[in-house]
Image (cartoon, helix red, strand yellow):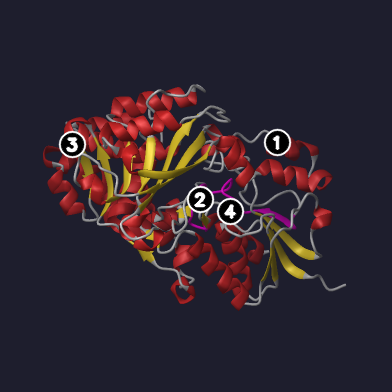
């Protein structure tokens, strides 16, 4: 009997959709199944607060999407995708109205950092200079043959360091905190090896391609992917929850944009018991506690550069960030959490009514945290933006359990696709070849595979390449 599809993709997040488009462009018949009423996974937008305000439910700022070889090759601007850039990619406020400021220009950043400018150039500059050769390397599985070994080696020397050690190259708080805030995207204590990789890569991305938002909301990115898939003859079915392999239409290959535990539960006895145990023991990291705000005016940051920055890392000095992330790793909620703030409406005024703004905020919290971090988050913002609460019109709160309900891949509120710990940092989800499973017709393509979390689609692209090679 002719199968209904060459490939069925379970999950319509960025990775699932990129996998589907990659297969469809190669002439395969593809069906995508999504449990929710809307596609998008971690890349949805919605009206979460007041009428006229568009909020990104999860991902909001997209350096990896604009840089992704998989996404850029699809020319999604033909389907309405447009990235817009804030005047300043990133700022990090400190006491006394000071701030570390990362400009799109490496030269401008080096100049503003003064005595630490030379150290910033030495740490970040080589990755900026080799960006076009470096990014494809770090977006691949770690255990692979590099096509540009010198670029990868140069990055690796810096990336292997704990962020706390790399930050010692700076004399002043501004540069050190600026770097540490980017490194904290690792969801790890900054004393751990390899945390510098996150700081170097994200800082270099800001200089090389910027930290843009999607005009109209992150949903436009997945909508563009869906439009390309339909254009190629692919099909997307929403409100279809897959609980077992029997729920799939007939197919040759199934790709799963799910976490490893869901894959194990769906596939069941088609996997050997030992392999299922390995999937079931996959480890997840800290959670996210998120607040979306509708504002009557811009955030009244004390520092002027923060008022022009698309992203603001709120955590104080390196020591304060280290303390907060260490508390989270121990399972304790810090009194002064590290808070990531995005101001999308600065670059994209379509997000809010005239004169108003949207604000996207989340803090790192312990895995499965059940408390209310709202007061702690707002106290951190007020610390560097006195009067912030006065411009709040409405707020929408999502703790770890709400994140997990919103997207089953976010176990315990982990939005990164799994903890960056031990062998799991290198081998995701298990030791061995990524993407493949003991059943050659079943492939994993989620953020629980290399290169991990983020809206870049490379997990889906590389999983699709495995299918095509077969």
Residue closest to the eye, 300 or 454: 300
| Placement of the N terminus among the 4 image quadrants | bottom right
Please indicate whether residue 41 sits to the left or right of residue 346 in the image: right
Q: Does residue 209 appear in the picture of this structure? A: no
Q: Does residue 198 appear in the picture of this structure? A: yes
Cα distance, mark 4 to mark 1?
Answer: 22 Å
Q: Which residue is mark 4?
A: 41
Q: Is residue 351 magenta?
A: no
Q: Which mark is residue 314?
A: none
Q: Residue at x 56, y 48 (%)?
A: 447
Q: Which residue is mark 1?
A: 280
Q: Residue at x 44, y 73 (%)?
A: 77
Q: Which residue is mark 2?
A: 48
Cα distance, mark 3 to mark 4?
Answer: 37 Å
Q: Earlier in the sequence, mark 3 or mark 1?
A: 3
Mark 2 residue element: loop
| Placement of the C terminus among the 4 image quadrants | bottom right
């Amino acid at each position: 009997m002719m199968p209904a599809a060459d490939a069925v993709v379970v999950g319509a997040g960025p990775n699932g959709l990129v996998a589907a488009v990659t297969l469809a462009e190669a002439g395969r018949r593809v069906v995508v199944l999504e449990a929710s009423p809307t596609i998008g996974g971690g890349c949805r937008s919605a009206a979460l607060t007041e009428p006229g305000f568009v909020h990104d439910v999860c991902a909001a700022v997209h350096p990896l999407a604009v840089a992704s070889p998989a996404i850029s090759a699809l020319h999604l601007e033909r389907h309405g995708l447009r990235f817009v850039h804030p005047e300043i990619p990133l700022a990090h406020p400190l006491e006394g109205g000071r701030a570390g400021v990362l400009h799109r220009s490496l030269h401008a950043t080096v100049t503003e950092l003064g005595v630490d400018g030379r150290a910033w150039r030495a740490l970040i500059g080589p990755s900026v200079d080799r960006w076009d050769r470096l990014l494809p390397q770090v977006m691949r599985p770690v255990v692979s043959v590099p096509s540009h070994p010198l670029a990868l080696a140069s990055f690796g020397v810096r990336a292997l360091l704990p962020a706390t050690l790399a930050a010692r190259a700076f004399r002043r708080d501004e540069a050190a905190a600026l770097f540490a805030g980017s490194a904290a995207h690792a969801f790890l204590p900054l004393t751990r090896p390899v945390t510098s990789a996150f700081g170097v890569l994200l800082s270099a991305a800001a200089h090389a391609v910027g930290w843009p938002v999607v005009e109209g909301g992150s949903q436009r990115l997945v909508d563009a992917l869906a439009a390309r898939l339909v254009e190629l003859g692919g099909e997307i079915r929403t409100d279809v929850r897959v609980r077992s392999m029997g729920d799939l239409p007939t197919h040759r290959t199934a790709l799963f944009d799910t976490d490893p535990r869901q894959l194990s539960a769906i596939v069941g006895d088609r996997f050997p018991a030992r392999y299922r145990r390995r999937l079931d023991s996959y480890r997840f990291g800290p959670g996210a506690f998120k607040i979306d705000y509708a504002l009557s005016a811009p955030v009244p940051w004390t520092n002027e550069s923060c008022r022009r920055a698309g992203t603001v890392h709120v955590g104080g000095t390196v020591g304060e960030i280290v303390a907060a992330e260490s508390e989270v790793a121990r399972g304790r909620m810090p009194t002064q959490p590290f808070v990531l703030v995005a101001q999308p409406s600065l670059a994209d005024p379509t997000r809010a009514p005239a004169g108003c703004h949207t604000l996207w905020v989340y803090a790192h919290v312990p895995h499965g945290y059940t408390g209310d971090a709202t007061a702690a988050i707002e106290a951190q913002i007020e610390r560097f933006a006195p009067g912030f609460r006065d411009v709040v019109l409405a707020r929408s709160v999502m703790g770890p359990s709400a994140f997990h309900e919103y997207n089953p891949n976010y176990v315990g509120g982990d939005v990164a696709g799994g903890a960056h710990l031990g062998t799991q940092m290198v081998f995701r989800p298990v030791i061995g070849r990524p993407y493949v499973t003991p059943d050659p017709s079943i492939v994993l393509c989620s953020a629980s595979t290399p290169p991990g979390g983020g809206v870049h689609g490379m997990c889906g692209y590389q999983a699709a390449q495995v299918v095509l090679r077969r």
